[in-house]
């Protein structure tokens, strides 16, 4: 059995376990809550909770309890409840939606409106409802910890072995005359991505965290050189020799025995020196000194300012989601429209942060609604001839639908069709089948029209625009890196360097690479890597006055490298000169 099939079977099993558990413990009325809890668990798997499991559990638990309490307070619907809905929807969307990631806000919002409009509880039933949500939080976080248990944030023998093996395989490919790309370094890239989204890595990493980042970044830099440059056979053999002995190297004199035929190999050797130095000096007892408050404020303030303004895609999307869902609730309050709950359930998955995605999403949802309605009619026609009660038939349909969804997660049309069948089946206890279909189609049409109008008219964003903003932000960070080299080369600035590096790489992860921006993106990656390489040297070694003066002269005046300096210093200064040439080329894109 292949891993893909195992994964799909695991998801099906997860859904079934959740549904039957909630039916058995909390009653058949809470079956749908179990379904959305399972959906939330699945969509949160990409957000690793193993880094701080207790904090992660507290956040998920708090979110679910807030949803449950506000849903209770909002029944029956009131003006006060509409205000609460606005803030709940806005808060859930802005805190859980990640750019270019899975829409983890969706199951939480669906769960809120299900509890509010379809499964309201009395005050006496509220404790049992909240208990079901506590169990849901345990389930969401527990599944995440099990699935992500092998992800690491600390260096271990196994992790080092994986990084060494990956780089060694890339060298073998190069020796065989084959191409090497970023895809050949999934361990290093994945390890780095696991770390840098966490808050302290961004703004005030500890000494151990800085060491981990330096090691992984050095492996990435070496990998990029192996992939992008034509190192000689002797140099590639030298890299394999270093990798074979890496964990046993105690003296930097070992690197003097390695052949150097190209200037890029000098950079490879310096990166290996960084790795060896960090491996030999990782000490969790090292003093943890926060960067100065002014520096932290200078990094955090623009991030917060942008994140909580309409210039932010995340903020604008959360605001629009809150506006449209609150509007449906107000209309329900004023006109007592029948089954307007479908406006909520049709609008939530149809809303999109980028207008690029919206038209296609609406078209597929409308096709899926019609297709789902036709399938539902066939089920109703066949029902009298089946030896099943209506409750058993509904359960069977739900299980089959969930299996179809799991096996076609990436097919929006099929998923929409099946969810339509599920939603229409779920409301049979409230309304006759023919009316159910008519209202379903009506509310989906209205929801689609309003969602499209709102997204295109009010603060429209495109992926291209957001990528352009992140390219500009990364250009700014690259400029700050060069200023840091110039102004602080005589200070130990590793904490500041790490924070700046991580912020720059976060911008890079939120850029959609196209034919138009690919050259600029690759240029920025080189600038970030070389800046980090130079700043790491500054943090690790004592700098001579001649070296520092030459460094400033290169940045300000494009001076030549002083040939009287020692070899390592000349390598760094030549790298700085190359960096300045790249930065000038990058500046042409923005000036």
Image (spheres, rainbow, N blue to C red):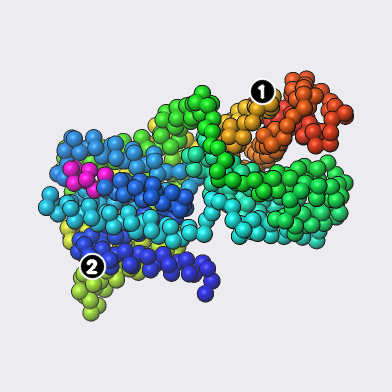
Residue range corresponding to the magenta coloring: 66-74
Label ID, residue 500: none
Q: Which residue is mark 1?
A: 487
User: Overall secondary structure of the magenta stretch?
Assistant: helix
User: Viewer-nearest of labels 2 and 1?
Assistant: 1
Q: Quadrant of residue 285?
A: top right
Q: Determine if residue 251 is in view.
A: yes
User: Where residue 318 appears, x then y in whole percent?
Assistant: 37, 38
Q: Is residue 107 magenta?
A: no
Q: On screen, 168 above or below 318?
A: below
Residue at horizontal 40 percent and vertical 34 percent from the top: 316
Q: Are marks 2 and 1 in contact (CB under 8 Å)?
A: no
Residue at horizontal 85 percent and vertical 27 percent from the top: 562
394 on left or right of 518: left
147 on left or right of 346: right
Q: Quadrant of the C terminus?
A: top right
Callout 1: SS: helix
């Amino acid at each position: 059995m292949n891993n893909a099939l195992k994964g799909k079977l695991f998801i099906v099993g997860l859904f079934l376990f959740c549904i039957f558990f909630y039916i058995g413990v909390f009653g058949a009325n809470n079956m749908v809550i179990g379904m959305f809890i399972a959906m939330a668990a699945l969509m949160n798997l990409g957000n690793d909770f193993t880094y701080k499991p207790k904090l992660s559990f507290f956040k998920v638990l708090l979110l679910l309890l807030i949803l449950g309490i506000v849903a209770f307070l909002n029944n029956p619907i009131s003006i006060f409840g509409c205000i609460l809905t606005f803030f709940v929807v806005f808060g859930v969307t802005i805190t859980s939606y990640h750019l270019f990631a899975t829409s983890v806000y969706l199951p939480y919002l669906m769960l809120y409106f299900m509890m509010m409009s379809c499964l309201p509880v009395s005050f006496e039933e509220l404790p049992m409802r909240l208990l079901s949500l506590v169990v849901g939080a345990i389930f969401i976080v527990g599944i995440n910890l099990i699935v992500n248990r092998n992800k690491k944030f600390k260096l271990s023998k196994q992790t080092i072995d994986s990084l060494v093996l990956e780089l060694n395989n890339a060298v073998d490919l190069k020796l065989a005359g084959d191409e090497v790309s970023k895809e050949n370094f999934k361990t290093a890239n994945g390890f780095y991505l696991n770390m840098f989204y966490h808050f302290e890595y961004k703004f005030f990493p500890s000494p151990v965290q800085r060491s981990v980042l330096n090691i992984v970044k050095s492996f990435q830099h070496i990998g990029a050189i192996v992939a992008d440059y034509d190192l000689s056979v002797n140099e590639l053999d030298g890299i394999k020799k270093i990798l074979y002995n890496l964990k046993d190297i105690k003296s930097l004199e070992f690197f003097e025995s390695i052949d150097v035929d190209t200037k890029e190999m000098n950079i490879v050797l310096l990166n290996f020196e960084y790795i060896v130095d960090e491996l030999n000096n990782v000490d969790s007892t090292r003093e943890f000194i926060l960067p100065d408050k002014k520096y932290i404020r200078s990094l955090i303030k623009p991030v917060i300012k942008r994140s909580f303004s309409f210039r932010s895609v995340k903020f604008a999307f959360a605001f629009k989601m809150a506006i449209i869902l609150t509007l449906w609730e107000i209309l329900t309050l004023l006109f007592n429209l029948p089954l307007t709950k479908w406006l909520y359930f049709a609008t939530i998955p149809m809303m999109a942060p980028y207008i690029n995605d919206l038209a296609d999403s609406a078209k597929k949802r409308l096709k899926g609604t019609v297709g789902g309605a036709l399938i539902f009619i066939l089920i109703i026609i066949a029902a009298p001839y089946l030896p099943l009660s209506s409750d058993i038939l509904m359960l069977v349909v739900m299980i089959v639908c969930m299996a179809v969804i799991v096996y076609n997660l990436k097919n929006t049309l099929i998923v929409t069709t099946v969810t339509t069948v599920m939603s229409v089946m779920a409301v049979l206890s409230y309304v006759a089948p023919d009316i159910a279909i008519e209202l379903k189609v009506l509310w989906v049409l209205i929801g689609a029209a309003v969602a499209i109008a709102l997204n295109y008219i009010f603060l429209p964003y495109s992926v291209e625009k957001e990528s352009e903003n992140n390219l500009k932000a990364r250009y700014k960070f690259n400029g700050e890196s060069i200023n840091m080299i110039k102004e602080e080369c005589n200070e130990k600035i590793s904490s500041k360097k790490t924070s700046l590096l991580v912020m720059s790489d976060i911008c890079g992860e939120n850029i959609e690479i196209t034919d138009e921006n690919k050259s600029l993106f690759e240029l920025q990656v080189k600038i970030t890597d070389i800046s980090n390489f130079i700043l790491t040297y500054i943090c690790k070694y004592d700098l001579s006055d001649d070296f520092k003066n030459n460094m400033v002269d290169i940045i300000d005046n494009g001076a030549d490298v002083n040939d009287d300096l020692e070899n390592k210093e000349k390598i760094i200064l030549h790298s700085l000169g190359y960096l300045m040439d790249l930065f000038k080329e990058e500046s042409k894109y923005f000036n």
